[in-house]
Amino acid sequence: MTEALRTATDPAPTPSTATAGPASPADTAREADAARELAAWRADRERDLRTPHGWLSLTGLLWPTSEPRRLPGLPGEWWVVDRTLYTRPAPGDTAVLTGERVAEHGPTLVAVDEGRSRVLGTFLPEDRAGSAAGAGKGADGAPGTDTEEVAVEVVLRTGRYGLRPRDPRAATRTGFTGVPAFGHDPGWVLGARVSWYDEPERVTVGAAQPRLVHHVQVIGEVDVVHGGTVTTLALTGTLDEPTLLFSDEADDVAPWRVLRIDLEAGEGEQGTLRLDLNRAVNLPYAFTEFGTCPAPVPGNHLPFAVTAGEKAPR
């Protein structure tokens, strides 16, 4: 990777904003189609956010220690030994954690890879015992759209195991009215020159939580041209699913956002990527204080306001 990502003056005009005259009827129709597609895509995204155990349902981020102990809002006792998380029922429990990986009488052992997570199981809080506990479950016992159960997610971040309850009654979910966003603007569909690395480079970045880091794979660079400047940004993820985490100078947006690049839709001329910044979205940390999302690679900052994509939700 370049030692410092670059911003430089570029004499070329911004590729998506220069126009020779009034838009043709065909161009107008294409822009209308693009706006409708974006609206449908955003509606799908909001439906995903609203799912009972989606990102809006997080209610805590708890850190077990080496001593077995109860944790607020969770049944059982939890502890960590030799990079493995353990849990077991505790005397007096009225709520019971269940799931395919949960040993009925304990202890249950859980291991996940660094930076990854998994839902271990679910439980029905005591104050919901009279509710339709099984409502909304599928044939495989998975929670459905109207479940009252709380899911328990296990994460491993910077060598530490954490637990995140995912509660359908979380205020961030029940009070959700949609994600504020800029309207569709074809001027933010940019053609960017791309340079893929022969081998990914591992880079350590910060996180939305203090004292946490992530190790990401930088797979290449893109040159973003706008307003007479070229800014070189690092691409992370995989060659099949590249991502662009970036910050910019816009007001009313989260400290950083992400653009997930669909290569089938995003391939431009040879050696370029089509970056539709209208589809820049918030990471989970923007919706909840319990997100552990990775920060952008140092230097992945656009020195202008990107007035496209999602705005800050809170």
Image: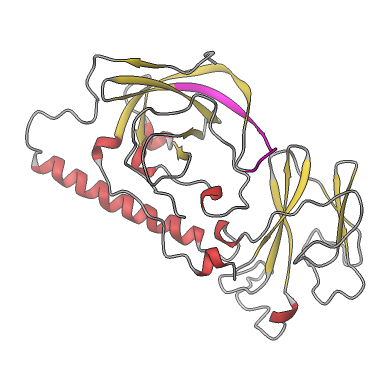
Q: Which sits in the foreground, 170 or 192? A: 170
16 vs 250: above or below: above
Magenta stretch?
Answer: 209-221
- Colouring mode (rainbow / by chain / secondary structure / one colour): secondary structure
Which residue: 12% across, 42% down? 26
Residue 111, image x and y in percent? 81, 46
**Image position, residue 24 (x, y; %):** 8, 39
User: In which quadrant is the N terminus drawn?
Assistant: top right
Decide whether the magenta segment is chiefly helix, strand or loop.
strand
Q: Total label count?
A: 0
Q: Which x, y percent locates residue 283?
A: 52, 46
- Residue 146 in the image: x percent, y percent? 57, 74
User: Going by the image, does 44 lie left or right of 187?
Assistant: right
Q: Residue at x 24, y 30 (%)?
A: 16
Is residue 89 in the magenta section? no
Q: What residue occupies the far bottom of the structure in this picture?
A: 130
Q: Is residue 85 left or right of residue 227?
A: right
Q: Nearer the viewer, residue 112 or 241?
A: 112
47 lies above or below 93: above
Which residue appears at 86% of the width and 50% of the height?
Answer: 65
Residue 277 falls in image quadrant: top left
The relative height of residue 93 versus residue 208 in the rendered view (above or below) is: below
Front residue of 200/203: it is 203
State the residue at coordinates (64%, 68%).
143
